[in-house]
Image: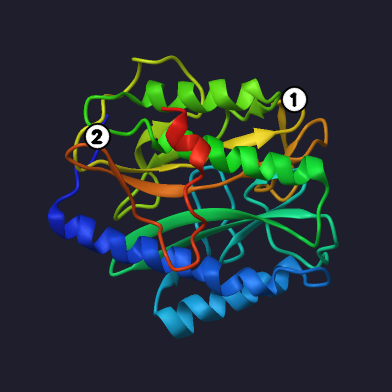
Amino acid sequence: MNIVIKTEEDIAKMRVAGRLASEVLDFITPHVHAGITTEELDRLCHDYMVNVQGTIPAPLNYCPPGYTPYPKSICTSVNHQICHGVPGPKKLKNGDIINIDITVIKDGYHGDTSRMFVVGEGSLAARRLCQITYEAMWIGIEQVRPGATLGDVGAAIQRFAEGFGYSVVREFCGHGIGQKFHEEPQVLHYGRPGTGVRLEKGMIFTIEPMLNAGRREIKEMPDGWTIVTKDHSLSAQWEHTVLVTDDGYEVLTVSAGTPAKPERAAMAV
């Protein structure tokens, strides 16, 4: 496994890319409301990335082996869509939940982050799923330090999520990131403590748990990209890009509008 340990120069550039990705989410937040289409959200984000930030939208035309090129600049996953939802003409309505996933490229380095949004008031069940998924991400982040393992991260997320009756999607995971969009290692959101890759200072990867309100089984839609829950239950995801430091971690995808770390994450360590 070829894990790239980042230099101080790499890290400085990843901080910039991470902040810029997060600032796209700050920018789009007031536009997420009933009546707007996900296609319009994509257009707004694309214009902001290209014309204001001078960044490249990494998803646009991204084409891993076995896929057709991704046709949009962001991913918008609504309600039972788990990840990689392709923006389109359908309008958001009150009560919807949506994950907006942003990856920008700045000076050759990738910044990758996503947030959940509740359209209008939202049901108690939907808001709870979004909140617990956010806390699960942070509980995973809190495991990150030199000498810990990726199994520690996954096990902490799984234990916390399943404790609330949610299931963890297993087919998609976090990933190393840097000058490439997806690098080693794969960061599973389930597992056993003490197993897997041992963390070292200078590693950078995403932690991005996907939790379903129902069963964990998934289905791919005919567009070849959008992944949904097989039982049509709601799904939520949050994502940060994380650096392993001398004695812990640094979250790189932070901006003025980034939600604060939840209290429960610190207490659970």
- The residue depicted at 37 percent of the width and 30 percent of the height is 143
Q: Can residue 58 be seen in this view?
A: no
Q: How far apart are marks 1 and 2 (CA)?
A: 34 Å
- Left or right: 61, with 91 as reference point: left
Residue position marked by numbered label 2 in the rendering: 2
Q: In which quarter of the image is the C terminus?
A: top left
Q: In this view, does 71 lie above or below 209?
A: below
Q: Is residue 109 above or below residue 145?
A: below
Q: Can residue 4 be seen in this view?
A: yes
* Quadrant in the rendering for residue 69: bottom right
- The residue depicted at 58 percent of the width and 54 percent of the height is 115
Where residue 204 appears, x then y in whole percent? 30, 45
**Label at residue 215:** 1
Q: Is residue 156 above or below residue 6?
A: above
* Amino acid beneath label 1: Arg
Where residue 126 appears, x then y in whole percent? 77, 44
* Amino acid beneath label 2: Asn
How many C-alpha atoms fall within 10 Å of the one at disc 2: few (<14), some, or many (≥20)?
A: few
- The residue depicted at 36 percent of the width and 26 percent of the height is 150
* Quadrant in the rendering for residue 111: bottom left
The kind of secondary structure element at disc 2 is: loop
Where residue 107 appears, x then y in whole percent? 28, 70
Where residue 217 appears, x then y in whole percent? 71, 26
